Image (cartoon, rainbow, N blue to C red):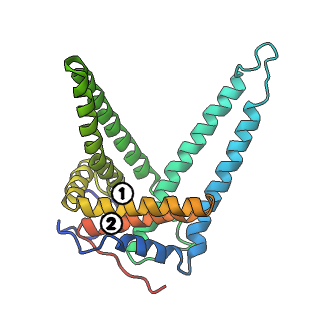
Amino acid sequence: MTTNSENLSYPHDHQPAPWGVTDPISYGFKRIFSRTWHMWIGLSLIFIVALIALIVAMITTLSVPLDVDNPSALTGGQIAALVVFYGIVFVVSIYLTALYYKAALRETHGEEQTWGNVFKVVPIGRALLAFIVVLGLMLVVYAIFALVIFLASLVSPWLIALVGILALIAFIPVTIILSFVQVYIIDGYGVGDALSAARRDVMREFWKILASLLLLTLIGYAITIVTLGLGLAAYIPLASLVTVYIYRKISGGNVVPLSS
């Protein structure tokens, strides 16, 4: 396993630690609504408010027609503003991914996260690497799928439907594995080791992981609907804590309990 000085992973004996389907979610809720609740939820609120303000500013900029002859045309300045907008969203998304996962890794390691330490040593570079790796692999998967669909279309229309169903089923474990690959990379694994370990660990306890993530998704929808979207402030860190909890368990480590 390739690590850096900030890697917080446990020794990996390739044997998963015991855990139940609901354990990650109950752990996540317990940590979010601990004495440091304002930090977990506050981070999300800062990002959500900033994103809304940025979107409003962008809409205002684009809604002002600067070309009277062609009001629907975008000017060079508006195009530049769009590029800057998407660039900011991308950079902030990478930063928040690194921030939340690193915070969750430390929290599960027994280091309680507060406003004073959550911003320390945020692995932006590793989060960017994870994004590039996952995006590249997803593009390869989609390209293979498109090729198979094309070849199936040359044979028979019913074969297209069959291939589509099989591909949809195959996408489920692939997507889950790739979602954990980024955690392995952020935690200090090299790319090759992360891919190998994520595939091995996820497939070893696939059904339990799938059930836990499905339950998390249902809870996320319920929270978002009941709170008219405000619950996203809690769901974002919850998802990170749940994912990292599962990562700790399936990779042979454990979760250090905190008293608060």
Mark 2 residue type: Ile
Location of the N terminus by quadrant is bottom left
Q: Residue at x 61, y 73 (%)?
A: 38
Q: How far from the left and from the top, in percent, is residue 166?
A: 24, 39
**Which residue is more in the foreground, 163 or 90?**
163
Examine the rendered structure and indicate whether residue 19 appears above or below residue 207: below
Residue underneath mark 1 = 183
Residue underneath mark 2 = 246
**Which residue is more in the foreground, 115 or 234?**
234
Any part of residue 102 in sight: no
Determine whether, in the image, residue 5 is placed left or right of residue 162: right
Q: Residue at x 55, y 74 (%)?
A: 114
Q: How far from the left and from the top, in percent, is residue 84?
A: 63, 36
Element at label 1: helix
Any part of residue 98 in sight: yes
- Mark 1 Cα within 10 Å, few/some/many (few <14, many 20+)? many
Q: How far from the left and from the top, in percent, is residue 130?
A: 38, 48
Q: Residue at x 35, y 52 (%)?
A: 179
* Disc number lying in front (2 or 1): 2
Mark 1 residue type: Val
Determine whether, in the image, residue 253 is placed left or right of residue 134: left
Where residue 36 sits, quadrant-wise, is bottom right
First along the sequence among labels 2 and 1:
1
Q: Please identify the residue farthest to the bottom as the structure is shown.
A: 259
